[in-house]
Amino acid sequence: MKITSIRKLLFNEKSFNPFSDNYNPEQIQLILKEYLKSEKEDTSQIKDKESDIDAVRIAVQTPVFNYYYKELYEYMKKTLSEPGINVINVIQYLIAIVNHDTKMIEMSINKMIQSTNQLRLEEMAMLKIDEKNFKSNAVNSYELQTDLLNLLLNYLKYFHKEDSRHDNAVPARIHEASSKMYRASNLLYVVKDAFDRMVWENGTIIEKNEELYLRYIEPDSQILLQLGMFRVQRNALAYSITIYQHLKENPIYLRFLSETRKGKNISNIRINSRGYIRYSVQNEGPNALLQSELVQGLAFIAAFYPHFTRKELEKLGKLTVDDLMVLHSELVHLTEKVKDCLPEVNDATDIKDYMVRIRKKDLMNYFIDTTTYTTTQIESYINLIQSDILQMERINLWKRPLVKDQDVFYLSIPSILSPNYLQLIDEWLEGAGFNLNERGFALETFIKNDLKSKLVSKGNFTIPSLSDFQISKKVSEEIDLIVSFDDFIFIAEIKNVKYPMEPRDVHNAIKRLSDGALQLKRKINFVQKHNDYFSELLNGVEGKPIYSAVICNYPHFTGMKLHDVPIIDFMALATYFGHGSITDLRSENIDAESQKVRELRLWNNRKEFADNFPNYLIKPTVVDDLKHKFKTKFHRITLETANPQMHLQVAEIIETN
């Protein structure tokens, strides 16, 4: 049998996955032996061969990773076979543990924020907390709670037996077992995530002095990914401030809120002895319309999904993304109130005090009490955000943060209070039937309209409204964007990708962008070949340089080159074509008036606008200006007693004193 790619086997074959029941190290050894033998006989495709040898190095080390999986899996299997312990009870305690830890993290963050007078927007995104004697990014600390719960729930559901639900529970033993699973999952998650990154993000594993170093073939791409995540937070914060200012200065903007919210807020909330939420609301009028939770959500829509704002989603009862965000902000607001009434963490607190839940009918009534949406619309929203622990689909609380068991929802506080809004929006649009191609068409229309308004003062330009350029019945090409100026032409392929939360998402996004780069090369050749046809449409082609890029909806890939084609996000492009400057803002808090700290000009006149553009595509200033804040280094990810030790190459923000 001819084996063409070990990395593809790592992608697709369960026998190569050390975190699967179907993992088969003997089969891997046989395949690797056959592959390496065939490689000695075939000296062609040297570059591809070198790349796949990096994958071979990963496959060779899979037994090390399998050890961590087996340790937790075997403990689960043994523990869940004991009388008095069942999956549902364990999940309840795990959620309580996560909520308990989140309360502790919040105490650390609040202490830090209270000691700071002013924060620049990027400093807010860099907040660090002390967590058990090591510094951790504040956002990452919240994220980890949800990541651990995702991992555990996806393993636990395979052990569930409905007939054991009503066994006599032994609370002390369940708490002990749940705590041990949670602690073990922390290390397993880190090791599994590191392995997935090596597999899906073009990495390898080098053995040196009996220790394993997990590194990337192109480390610079990791800096760009981290920088992209940083820009997501910074841009969303900037939009939050802008939205607050608009709402304060122009009350007409509150019309949307008054049409969707009833001006009622929670006046009282309590959690009974069984963890069920009880609440009451009261009318507070216009002052209750504006919630910080809603502003934050709307900021992410304004920054990254302006092409879907106010667009009715037929499959969801004609709700818009903005409407879904109103409903979600109400859930966040409810959960915030729940968190506030939880006891402060100390030695006397009982873990069961952090186990909170709400019946579906009570949650439905809460949305009916506080919003103007119909029962059908509310049901559509709830169906989008629930993770049923009894279903076999993979659970992802970033996309569906409500943990459902029959007619009850358990509240995982970090999953709701620290949402990844962009992953949520992607999931909502997927649920509404809008695939990536359809989202790309919407982005294409938005970009064309946006550029037409921004380029009015930049001299003569032409942006054809059509995308399908037909030379004859048999000869045509679809080109997403062409902008023709008197002195140059810009041609772009527009790609909407899913938010790259996990290593597989990064791989899929880069593959989609890579396909776009190859398509773009073909389309540029088409324009050059049919010079006369396009000369008429574009006010001349001859003598004009053609610049090109793949435009993406997210900033994580800006600054990359795929097949020698630059990748840029639409916000970075709009910055150049618009006001042509990058501005740093300072604000005392999110709803305070912001002040300009620094402005960096990208061009100062029409000549510089044309001259600087090609270099901006290759090295976007929005990326170059921040790149010095990041570096790559190796971090030990295993315990001090582990053998072998593992070190993961990571890109991180450089500490500044």
Image (cartoon, rainbow, N blue to C red):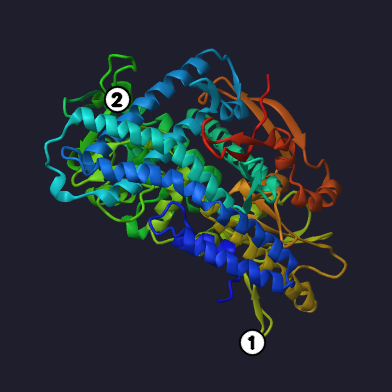
Residue 45 higher or lower than 271, as above or below: below
Which residue is labeled 1 in the image?
474
Q: Confirm whether residue 40 shows in the render.
A: yes
Q: Earlier in the sequence, mark 2 or mark 1?
A: 2
Residue at 75%, 52% in the rendered image = 617
Residue at 15%, 45% in the rendered image = 164
Residue at 61%, 58% in the rendered image = 55
Q: How far apart are marks 2 and 1 (CA)?
A: 65 Å
Picture quadrant of residue 462: bottom right
* In the displayed structure image, the side of residue 419 where residue 542 appears, left or right: right
Three-letter amino acid code at disc 1? Lys
Q: Confirm whether residue 553 shows in the render.
A: no
Image quadrant occupied by the N terminus: bottom right
* In the displayed structure image, the side of residue 333 where residue 361 appears, left or right: left
| Secondary element type, mark 2 | loop
Picture quadrant of residue 23: bottom left
Residue at 54%, 67% in the rendered image = 31
The residue closer to the viewer here, 514 or 82, is 82
Three-letter amino acid code at disc 2? Glu
Q: Which mark is residue 284?
A: 2
Residue 464 higher or lower than 597, as above or below: below
